[in-house]
Amino acid sequence: MILPLKWSDPQLLTESLTEAIPISQEEVVSVVPSDQRILLVDDNEAVIIQISSILNNVGYKVDVAQRGKEAIDYLQHTKPDGIILDLMMPDMDGFEVLAQIRNQNMTAKIPILVMTAKDVTAKDLKILKSNNIQQLIQKGNVDKNQLLIKIRSMLENEPALKKKASLQQRGKKTQSGIQTVLIVEDNQDNLTSLKAILDGKYRLLEARDGEQGIKATFEHLPDLVIMDMMLPRMDGFEVVKRIKADETTKGIPVIALTSKAMKGDRENILAAGCDDYLARPVGQEIILNKLEEWLG
């Protein structure tokens, strides 16, 4: 691990580590090649110490940059296997750092996990997606297991299974000329309303509980999933975590559609792995615009 010789805010060492990133005590079995190197870009020293410790303990090598410019300078001479990037930094925010990384041939394809306390907006998510960010963690809503799973998923090469599935899916779309949307919803009235809005515009599949939702996602590989978060047998939070943890399905956009409207619900839903969020009641035009945004 490489740490800077001078830290800018020593008082941050007194911050509660569990407030910055709650870590579960459940042991994670993780086999990591000893030569995999992660660049951690974050100005919070408590987070640096905690994340570095977690990653070192399972075999990753960790380098640290506490400022955006420091990260850019590092990347001029070193190419890590992956980057963990905070969005809120004092001299150059994470979006600027991301743009510079993607604009350089040497660094354009480095996988990046964004980890931030920022209230990520739909506009922010669109920017992240356009820069090939597939992994996002909200600080304060991540445990040790989730962090390691997402890092491992970020670093793994695309397996043959995913390539084969993607080719099959593209072939189906070419033949039918229409994209497939899976609706995971247990309320018949809500399901009927969604089908009335989307019928004729997309090929529709439906699942009535969480387990059926997972099964349908893996069997049919839809282009997008609309998912109620309050489902029987397995809730939407667990469903989306399983979808995003698998190489074959993690790239499928998942839009949460829920009646939950309490403070923090949106952040929790996005942290669970959903790509976007709609709160009921929601109008026909809003739903269609949202699908158009993700499917084109």
Image (cartoon, helix red, strand yellow):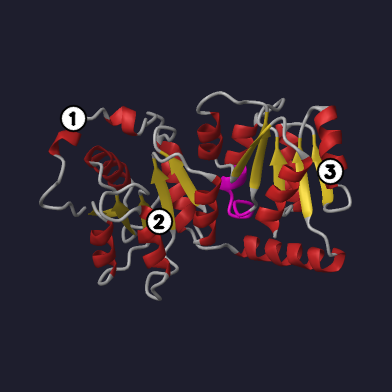
Distance Cα–Cα, label 3 vs label 2: 35 Å
Q: Is residue 249 one of those drawn in magenta?
A: yes
- Magenta stretch holds residue 126: no
Q: Which mark is residue 14?
A: 1
The x and y percentages for residue 185 are 76, 33
CA–CA distance in space, label 1 to label 3: 53 Å
- Decide: is 99 above or below 231: below
Q: Does the magenta stretch mainly form a helix, a strand or a loop?
A: loop
| Residue depicted at x 11% and y 50% | 6
For the point 30% across and 52% down, the residue is 40
Nearest the camera: 116 or 218?
Answer: 116
Q: Residues within 10 Å of mark 3 (few under 14, many from 20)?
A: some
Relative to residue 32, is residue 158 drawn left or right? Answer: right
The amino acid on which the numbered mark 2 sits, given as a three-letter code, is Phe
SS at circle 3: helix
Residue beneath the point at 57% across and 40% down: 241
- Which x, y percent locates residue 247? 58, 54
Residue 162: in sight, yes or no? Answer: yes
Q: Quadrant of residue 284?
A: top right
The residue nearer to you, when weighing 230 against 263, is 263
Q: Which residue is mark 3?
A: 197
The numbered mark, 1 or 3, whose residue comes first in the sequence reads 1
Labels 3 and 2 touching (C-beta < 8 A): no
- Would you say the residues marked 1 and 2 are in contact, meaning their CB atoms lie under 8 Å apart? no
Q: Residues within 10 Å of mark 1 (few under 14, many from 20)?
A: few
**Residue at (23% x, 60% y) in the render:** 70
Q: Tell me which numbered mark, 3 or 2, is placed earlier along the sequence.
A: 2
Please state the extent of the stretch shown in magenta in the rendering.
Answer: 242-251
Q: Position of residue 179 (x, y in %)?
A: 78, 57
Across and down, in percent, residue 208 comes to: 79, 32
- Quarter of the picture containing the C terminus is bottom right
**Which residue is the site of mark 2?**
95
